[in-house]
Amino acid sequence: MSRVQLLFAGADEYNDIWVKAAASLPDLDLVLYRPGLDPSRFRYLMLWRPVPGLLPAMPNLKAVFSFGAGVERHLANPEIPAHVPIVRMVEPGLTQGMADYVLWQVLRHHRRFWELEEAAREGRWAPHWYPAAWDRKVGILGLGNLGQAAARQLLSFDFQIRGWSQSRKDLPGIASFAGTAELPAFLKDLEILVCLLPLTPQTAGILNAGLFAQLAPGAALINAGRGGHLVEADLIPALNSGQLAAASLDVFATEPLPGDHPFWAHPRIFVTPHNASDTDPGTGLGEVWRQIVAFEGGRPLENVVERARGY
Ligand code: GLV
């Protein structure tokens, strides 16, 4: 196979580390998009934020590789032609990063480390009781690649794991709930809820007061899906009433989270800057290259977005 060119666009802040990663793939030519570049010859595009006018100028495009796992921004981009497949990012670095983030936050809430940290800041010696991990009910909304990896990580720490997804999954050790009808049974008595759903019209706003009321009193919320999953106005009232004890949020309706947003100052909301997990340039580009080689060899692309279902 001759050298293949991949145009890289809409993620300029990552340019340097991706160019460095590409150096280890001699048959791949990673070309950074810049205004004025003629994109018409490229057959493969790696895209994150939309670059207006780019796709209509790419008549030879065979596939769009999403820089990230969430693809709602691509589905909202009217410039991506319907016949061009969009490939979601599924790669070990992104998967492991999310499993790490979820484990970190679940442990924080499981052991209520924030109470110990608050006490330490005030110079108070205040040990507290906590249940064993095997008595802790943790639920994961979304059992795709990331949700399954997070579930496996938590299982290895002996938590009780439930998962909820569109279709039922047969995963060892994980109680699987599917569809709207089974959402209440999934939520019942959950003490820690993790959201890793794709953002679709069906999942937008799913984290709301009505859902919080179905969890165990004093439950914790972890959202590393999308900001659009959370009805932001419902969170602080749920924390103030004690329905929720605390929340870890990585994603927000508006990003960057505005400096005057009340989430920053709330003592029981733990904000991270959409940094739960990132695509690793080494393994991420390796995965894109693996797919290009297979596709050029006549094999189908994997992890292609189903546009009708929205992920
Ligand atoms: C990041 O948010 C991603 O979708 O990978």
Image (cartoon, helix red, strand yellow):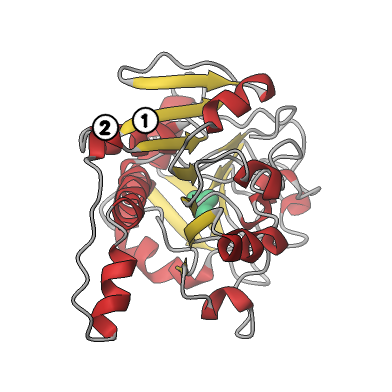
At label 2, which amino acid type do we have? Leu
Image coordinates for residue 256, horizontal then vertical, percent: 59, 74
In the image, the residue with mark 1 has its CB under 8 Å from the nearest atom of ligand 1: no
The residue tagged 1 is 161
Q: Nearer the viewer, residue 129 or 155?
A: 129
Query: Do the residues bearing badges 2 and 1 touch, measured as CB atoms within 8 Å?
Result: yes
At label 1, which amino acid type do we have? Ile
Q: Which mark is residue 172?
A: none
| Residue at 41%, 13% in the rendered image | 170
| Residue at 40%, 44% in the rendered image | 3
| Residue at 51%, 43% in the rendered image | 196
Image coordinates for residue 62, horizontal then vertical, percent: 62, 36
Q: Which corner quadrant holds the N terminus? A: top left
Regarding residue 296, the answer to whether it shows in the image is no
| Residue at 76%, 62% in the rendered image | 52
Image coordinates for residue 56, horizontal then vertical, percent: 78, 51
Give the structural element (helix, strand or loop) at label 2: helix
- Figure check: 244 above or below 147: below
Quarter assignment of residue 83: top right
> What is the residue that sits farthest to the right in this orientation?
78
Q: Nearer the viewer, residue 171 or 45?
A: 171
Q: Nearer the viewer, residue 232 or 97?
A: 232
- Figure check: 199 above or below 252: above
Q: Which mark is residue 155?
A: 2
Number of marks drawn: 2
- Figure check: 203 above or below 46: above
Quarter assignment of residue 201: top right
- Figure check: 95 above or below 128: above
Q: Is tag 2's residue or tag 1's residue first in the polypeptide sequence?
A: 2
Q: Which corner quadrant holds the C terminus? A: top right
In the image, the residue with mark 2 has its CB under 8 Å from the nearest atom of ligand 1: no
Q: CA distance from mark 2 to mark 1?
A: 7 Å
